[in-house]
Image (cartoon, rainbow, N blue to C red):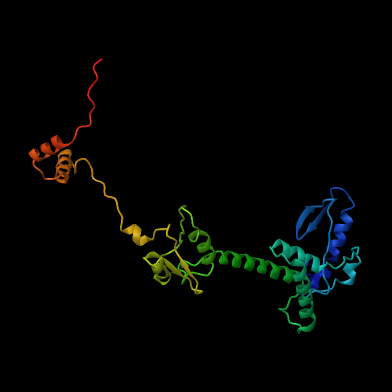
Amino acid sequence: MDRIFVGLCQIQSILQGLKAASVYPNAEIKLVGKTLKINPHAGIFITMHPGYAGQSNLPDNLKKRFRSMVMTRPDGELITQVLLFSQGFRTAEILASKVVPFFSLCDEQLSKQPHYDFGLRALKAVLTSTGHLKRACSLQNQNLDDTPDQLSDSYDSIAEQEILVQNAKRHWIIFDGDTDPEWVKNLNSVLDDNKLLTLPNGERLNLPNNHATQATVSCCGMVCFGEDAVTPDMLYENYLKTTPDVALEVVAENILMEPTTREPNNPK
């Protein structure tokens, strides 16, 4: 019974009847107009916090019916450390040594108000909300901007490792995200014949000769024709157009005038 109301002393007679009937096996008692069987293994316990806000003291005539037990005060700093560790905080010891005294000072220094609660229950609620906020901020930082305004300085290491390597290996640098004109225009100088990339920090990187720019690649192309579009007759006519336009008589004379270097066959 966490909340003790003022009229609790009126149930003393009911508790006295329960205690007397519990001595006999299979005993019954009338409670609120109903007949109920009493479990001999049942017990009645009252838990209370006299100094807690909104609670009343147990009446003396009812207190003597129970055996009093005193519990030690829980270690708030240790409980706070465990809660902070469970919420993902790495420096739980340092935070617990600051949070618990803060709640204690608020309880001592602030004025007494009905809605003020600086106990362990309120502390646990605050730590749980802090853990939710921490996880929400961690997920938010993992999301990258869809359209970055410009190339950041972290591109320096990528450029030095990938672009400035003097070898014949092919390298790819992929810019994931929307192609926004605000940062794509910074690549114009490296894609043209200048082959020069200017970073926001003022550093200028030259593209080696073993790397072809997009301007060079865009000038080359490959066109494929199917067999129905290009026939063998068309290929033959195109080959004839590449031959020199000379009369056959002149070609025959040139062949006859060439010196022969053949050796005569030796008869066996």
Q: Quick check: 188 left or right of 61?
A: left
User: Residue drawn at (89%, 66%), measured in percent from left and top?
Assistant: 70
Q: Is residue 180 visible?
A: no
In percent of the image, x 66 and y 66: which residue is there?
A: 131
Q: Quadrant of the N terminus?
A: bottom right
Left or right side of 130 for 98: right
Q: Is residue 45 visible in this depiction of the protein?
A: yes
- Quadrant position of the C terminus in the picture: top left
Q: Nearer the viewer, residue 149 or 194?
A: 194
Along the line of sight, the residue nearer the viewer: 143 or 216: 216
Give the left or right position of residue 63, taking residue 55 as reference. Answer: right
Q: Residue at x 85, y 64 (%)?
A: 13
- Residue 146 x %, y %: 46, 66
Lateral position of residue 108 relative to residue 166, left or right: right
In this rendering, is residue 118 above or below 246? Answer: below
Q: How many marks?
A: 0
Where residue 224 appears, as percent x and y from the top left, is 26, 46
The image position of residue 123, as x and y in percent, is 73, 71
Look at 23% across and 29% down and name the residue there.
262
Residue 29: percent from the left, percent from the top?
Answer: 82, 55
Task: Please state which of residues 208 and 248 is positioned toward the viewer in this rendering.
Answer: 248
Q: Quadrant of residue 16?
A: bottom right
Of 219 and 120, nearer the camera is: 219
